Image (cartoon, grey):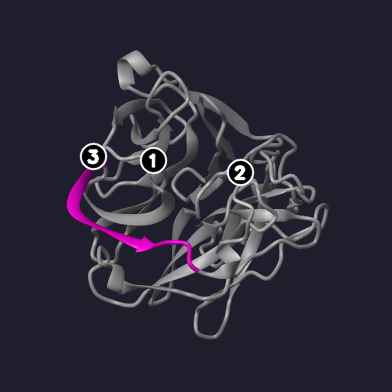
Amino acid sequence: MKQVYNPVGEFESPDPFMTYDPVTGYYYALFTRGSVLEIFRSRYANDIVRGGDSKVIYTPNGERDGIWGDIWAPEMHKGINGKWYIYTSGRKQQERGEKRLFIMEAESEDPFGEWHFKCQPSPDVFSIDPTVYTHTDGKQYICYSEVDGQQILTIQELVNPYTFGPKRAVIAKAEYDWELVPPYVGRAAINEGAFFLRRGERLFIIYSGNGCWSDHYCLGVLEYVGGDLCDAASWKKHDRPIFTYGNGVYGPGHASFFYSPDGNEVWCAYHGMKEHNETVSATARYFHLQKVEFDAQGYPVMGLPVGSGVAMDPPSGECD
């Protein structure tokens, strides 16, 4: 049994996405890696960046694709057509400026195979951090952080894995004191890094509040309360964060969630800083893993980050 230790890897690895594919028997991970899209894989969670395989699957070409670099927060999801897609964002202009969502499509059932640039979907708005959810009725939805004076969470239906439908709603803006911790350093209030998490009959969106450069970057919760998913009235924002800094890990956030190989456990992949960031400036963020618990009603319970070097049993059902 290969135990898990945080941080999982020593290179800077912000905005982690991780999943397990029972078809191939591999974990896959993606991170913000600057001007490339790079995919990692391993049979073991602890080895995903320490001893697994990796390959660059896309380098932007602005003249060809309209994406010039600064690829942030990629995520890989399977479409209703059975194909794998990567949803991410990149710089729209050659010089630093606004970002746009774009989508990659896998050319085979193997996520470690070849990929190609699919499209920049509409609407043409400044957006980052896309994530995708397949509802119980088979319909798919995308949630992203739209930059409109502040960063707000928008949900939109998908007609197919790469085409946005007309239904769209803003479902969250920063409003509580714990997601409005100053200073902003010239930046507006932030809700970003959303990820759908379903537990039994309850559906949540776990998101990040504050800025990723802050000790107070943390995880908040939106909960679906029924009705049209593309209706702001269908979502309730809980008034307390579920994950904040502690045990020597600062600014824990931008999380993704995945099931263990046997499907019995939910795990969280997130980034955190190693030191208190007094200057509130851009600093290195590192990849962490942690098992998620749930209370008797199915609400996620995370507590504080597991500290550096503490051994954790791997996700249940991991191969020997």
Observer-nearest residue: 32 or 47? 32
The residue that appears at 29% across and 32% down in the rendered structure is 120
| Other residues around mark 1 within 10 Å, as few (<14) / some (14–19) / many (≥20) | many
Residue 27 placed where, x, y %?
55, 45
Amino acid type shown at disc 2: Arg
Q: Is there a contact, CB below 8 Å, between mark 1 and mark 3? A: no
Observer-nearest residue: 235 or 266? 235
In the picture, measured across the screen, residue 124 lies left or right of residue 58, that is left
The residue that appears at 70% across and 39% down in the rendered structure is 283
Q: Is residue 164 magenta?
A: yes
Q: Disc 3 vs disc 2: which is toward the camera? A: 3
Element at badge 1? strand
Quarter of the image that includes the N terminus: bottom right
Q: Which residue is mark 3?
A: 122
Amino acid type shown at disc 1: Tyr
Q: Main secondary structure of the magenta part?
A: strand
Q: Earlier in the sequence, mark 3 or mark 2?
A: 2
Q: Is residue 248 magenta?
A: no
- Magenta range is 162-175
- Do we see residue 50 in this rendering? yes
CA gap, disc 1 and disc 2: 24 Å
